[in-house]
Amino acid sequence: MGLTEPLVRRLNEAAGVAAREAKPIFRAAIGRLSLADVPGIATQRDGATQFLRTSAGADLTARLRPLVDRGLGQVGALRELDRVAASTPLLRTAGLTRDRIGSSVTEQALNGIFRYIGSEEGRLRDNPVGALGGALKGLLGQ
């Protein structure tokens, strides 16, 4: 196992913990949707995703960052960072600090969330009838 593999694994775990907090923030952003937002949403392949990123991005960052920091501590990532930093000056030289790791994990979590939303939006736009058909089958019990 490489020197940083446990750290990377723990960072990924922390990002997953934080990502679950996005749902209520997205609901609030959708609640603020106005008619002025509709053309951008309707005319761009990822219009809804871009709307959410613009309207909820700052709130998500503010909400997720403390969770990421707490998650990093809970999964042992900060302890692992300190261990690796103590054994090699490479991290200090590269400027990898607890703060920069927290910012990076938060940003990566948000990028992952929006990448997923964008791919789902694209899939729905490519085949809107297919998505509706699946919902109807579920409603009709077929």
Image (tube, rainbow, N blue to C red):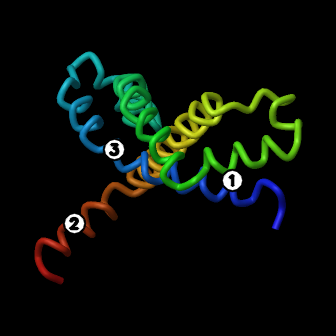
Q: Nearer the viewer, residue 13 or 27?
A: 13
Residue at 46%, 37% in the rendered image? 46
Instruction: Tell whether label 1 touches label 3 (CB within 8 Å).
Output: no
SS category of the residue bearing label 3: loop
Q: What residue would you read off at disc 3?
A: 21
Marks 2, 3: nearer the viewer:
3
The extreme left residue here reads: 140
Say which amino acid is labelled 2.
Ala
Position of residue 55 relative to residue 135, above or below, is above
Q: Secondary structure at mark 1?
A: helix
Q: How many marks?
A: 3
Q: Position of residue 109 (x, y in %)?
A: 52, 43
Query: Dot 2: what SS?
Result: helix
93 sits to left or right of 105: right
Specify the quadrant of the image occupied by residue 21.
top left
Q: What type is the residue that disc 1 sits on? A: Leu
| Residue extending farthest top | 36
Would you name the residue on which mark 2 appears?
A: 135
Q: Tell me the crowding category of disc 1: few under 14, some 14 to 19, or many 20 or more residues within 10 angstroms, Cα based.
A: many
Taking the view exactly as shown, the residue that stands out farthest to the bottom is 142
The residue closer to the viewer here, 138 or 133, is 138
Residue depth check, mark 3 versus mark 1: number of the one nearer the observer: 1
Quadrant where the C terminus is found in the figure: bottom left
Dot 3 surroundings within 10 Å: few (below 14), some, or many (20 or more)? some
Q: Amino acid at mark 3?
A: Glu
Residue 102 picture quarter:
top right
Give the residue pinned by disc 1.
Answer: 7
Q: CA distance from mark 3 to mark 1?
A: 22 Å
Badge 2 local density, few (<14 within 10 Å), some, or many (20+)? few
In the image: residue 75, left or right of residue 98: left
Indicate which label's residue lies in the foreground, 1 or 2. 1
